[in-house]
Amino acid sequence: MKDARGVLVASFLLLISAVFTFLYGGVVAFFPGLVNEPQPLLSTILAAVTLLAAFGIWREQSWGRPLGIAIAAVLLVRDVAFVFSGRPVEVVSVLLDVILLYVLVRGAWGLPGRPVRS
């Protein structure tokens, strides 16, 4: 990634996503519409892969950013499915996933058009 703040923000958001995925994995449906019952094992695996992506981004490994983008896309699709299944409280999670995906795809934190500081 181009920006140290982008690395920090992306790693922090991935860590938060991993913690909430792990904590709520045994309580809520894993993926509304496809898997409508709680799946603690699948949620734990998703949380572990999310932590692995955060570690890869933090250590600036070449595989960290693509893995983070893939995980952020999966989390975004899952949270949008939650919103459409009647859980409007997940809108906040959707916004956080959009911010995470933006930071990972752009490679920096901040608005486009501004120079990236190192």
Image (cartoon, rainbow, N blue to C red):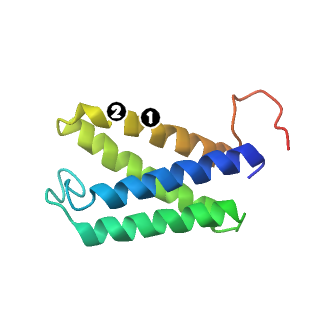
| Disc sitting over residue 95 in the figure | 1
Q: Residue at x 29, y 69 (%)?
A: 42
Residue 25 in picture, x, y percent from top left: 27, 60
Structural distance between the alpha carbons of marks 1 and 2: 6 Å
Expressed as whole percent of the image width and height from the top left, the position of residue 114 reads 79, 28
Number of disc labels: 2
Relative vertical location of residue 115 with respect to residue 62 in this rendering, above or below: above
Expressed as whole percent of the image width and height from the top left, the position of residue 86 reads 17, 35
Which residue occupies the foreground of this view, 28 or 74?
28
Secondary structure at badge 2 equals helix
Residue 115 lies, with reference to residue 11, above or below; the image says above
Q: Residue furthest left?
A: 37
Packing grade of label 1 (10 A; few <14, some 14-19, many >=20) is some
Q: Which mark is residue 104?
A: none
Q: Residue 85, located in which quarter of the rendered image?
A: top left
Q: Is residue 107 visible?
A: no
Residue at 37% from the left image edge and 71% from the top image edge: 45
Quarter of the image for residue 91 reads top left
Residue denoted by label 2: 91
Q: Quadrant of the C terminus?
A: top right
| Secondary structure type for disc 1 | helix
Q: Residues at badges 1 and 2 in contact (C-beta under 8 Å)?
A: yes
Q: Amino acid type of disc 1?
A: Leu
* Residues packed near mark 2 inside 10 Å, few (<14), some (14 to 19) or many (20 plus): some
In the image: residue 83, left or right of residue 74 = left
Residue depicted at 54% across the width and 68% down the height: 52
- Find residue 100 and report its horizontal and vertical position in percent: 54, 44
Horizontal side of 114 relative to 88 (left or right) equals right
**Badge 2 amino acid:** Val
